[in-house]
Image (cartoon, rainbow, N blue to C red):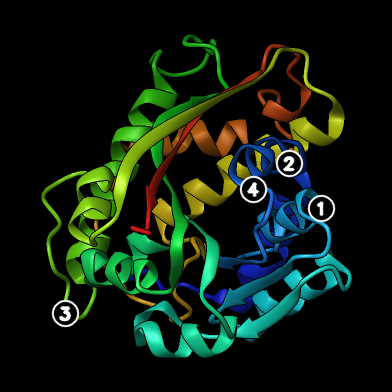
């Protein structure tokens, strides 16, 4: 069984907020408009986007919202007084979020949080209902699987990273199905925004690339991210972020034993195949942001 430990995840989310500062700043600049007064980051994690929004729109009220106090403490420290941090859960519906924000929002950002809600459409509906006329809801969900490894690592069968993505996809389906009160959403995020009553719905996908060789701190981050993913799929540790409480997934083998053995060798700092000593790892990522506008 796998259970989310939000307190244990808080540090990783803070590190992610720091590591993705450039991406957050780039996206924030495309989202913020002159005249925006109230902006919110729902499911803020380490507060990376909340900080970027505050820096992109000085003088605006920016609210970072999360359901876990340990995660929110990391966001508060990371944003260093630039934003107001509030404790509220997307699972509880619109009203707690409305009270946390305090006024209709010109922009609401939600990254990798709505997909943890049992009823994703209801969550999108709730967020859309918090917008001021003409306000925007931006959901960072999906994109393309990132690529960091060469196809042939000289250990195990080639295509190891592809098989990891497939295993994680199977895991995600079981996770979704296991949520209490889980409701299927058999359509895409743009359709969900449209069903929530938003208009001018579109998607922007942002490509980011860091070529090999990676700087030591970036390489460490890539290795740690792989370690977290493997722990998730082998029952070895906490993971994820989004709605502030744990959920369990039935035990099963997500990866072939041969691949598990390869990953253990790749992630062993004392072993001959440790990824942290390779010079051919890179980062290629495409992340999608789905945007809808409240009618005026």
Residue 32: mark: 4
How packed mark 4 is, by other alpha carbons closer than 10 Å (few <14, some 14-19, many 20 or more), is: some
**Can you identify the residue that label 2 sits on?**
25
Report, in whole angstroms, how far the alpha carbon at label 3 lies from the one at label 4.
Answer: 35 Å
**Can you identify the residue that label 1 sits on?**
55
Q: What element carries label 1?
A: helix
In screen coordinates, is 50 left or right of 114?
right
Counting residues from the start of the chain, the first of labels 1 and 2 encountered is 2
Image point 22% across, 64% down: which residue? Answer: 121
Q: Is mark 4 on a helix, strand or loop?
A: loop
Counting residues from the start of the chain, the first of labels 3 and 1 encountered is 1
Residue 271: mark: none
171 to 60, vertically: above or below: above
Counting residues from the start of the chain, the first of labels 3 and 4 encountered is 4
Image quarter of residue 174: bottom left
Image point 28% across, 69% down: which residue? Answer: 125
187 to 249, vertically: above or below: above
Counting residues from the start of the chain, the first of labels 1 and 4 encountered is 4
Image point 46% across, 90% down: which residue? Answer: 96
Q: Position of residue 73 (x, y in %)?
A: 75, 79
**Can you identify the residue that label 3 sits on?**
181
Counting residues from the start of the chain, the first of labels 2 and 3 encountered is 2
19 to 198, vertically: above or below: above
Q: Where is residue 36 in the image (x, y as percent from the top left)?
A: 65, 58
Nearer to us of marks 3 and 4 is: 4
Report, in whole angstroms, how far the alpha carbon at label 1 lies from the one at label 2.
Answer: 8 Å
Counting residues from the start of the chain, the first of labels 4 and 2 encountered is 2
How packed mark 2 is, by other alpha carbons closer than 10 Å (few <14, some 14-19, many 20 or more), is: some
Which residue is more in the foreground, 117 or 226?
117
In screen coordinates, is 210 left or right of 113?
right
């Amino acid at each position: 069984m796998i259970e989310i430990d939000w307190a244990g995840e808080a540090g990783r989310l803070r590190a992610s907020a720091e590591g993705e500062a450039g991406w957050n700043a780039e996206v924030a600049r495309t989202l913020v408009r002159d005249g925006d007064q109230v902006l919110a980051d729902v499911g803020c994690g380490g507060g990376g986007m909340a900080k970027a929004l505050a820096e992109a729109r000085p003088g605006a009220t920016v609210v970072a919202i999360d359901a876990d106090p340990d995660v929110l403490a990391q966001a508060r420290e990371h944003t260093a007084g630039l934003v107001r941090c509030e404790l509220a859960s997307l699972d509880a519906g619109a009203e707690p979020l409305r009270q946390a924000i305090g006024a209709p929002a010109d922009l609401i950002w939600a990254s990798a949080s709505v997909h943890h809600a049992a009823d994703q459409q209801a969550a999108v509906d709730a967020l859309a209902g918090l917008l001021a006329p003409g306000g925007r809801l931006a959901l960072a969900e999906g994109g393309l699987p990132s690529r960091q490894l060469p196809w042939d690592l000289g250990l195990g069968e080639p295509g190891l990273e592809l098989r990891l993505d497939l295993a994680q996809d199977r895991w995600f389906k079981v996770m979704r199905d296991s949520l209490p009160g889980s409701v299927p959403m058999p359509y895409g995020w743009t359709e969900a925004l449209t069903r929530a009553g938003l208009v001018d719905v579109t998607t922007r996908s942002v490509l980011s690339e860091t070529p090999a060789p990676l700087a030591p701190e970036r390489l460490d981050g890539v290795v740690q991210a792989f370690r977290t993913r493997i722990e998730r799929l082998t029952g070895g540790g906490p993971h994820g972020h989004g709605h502030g409480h744990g959920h369990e997934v039935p035990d099963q083998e997500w990866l072939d034993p041969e691949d598990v053995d390869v990953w253990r060798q790749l992630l062993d700092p004392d072993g001959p195949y440790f990824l942290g000593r390779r010079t051919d790892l890179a980062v290629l990522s495409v992340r999608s942001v789905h945007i809808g506008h409240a009618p005026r």
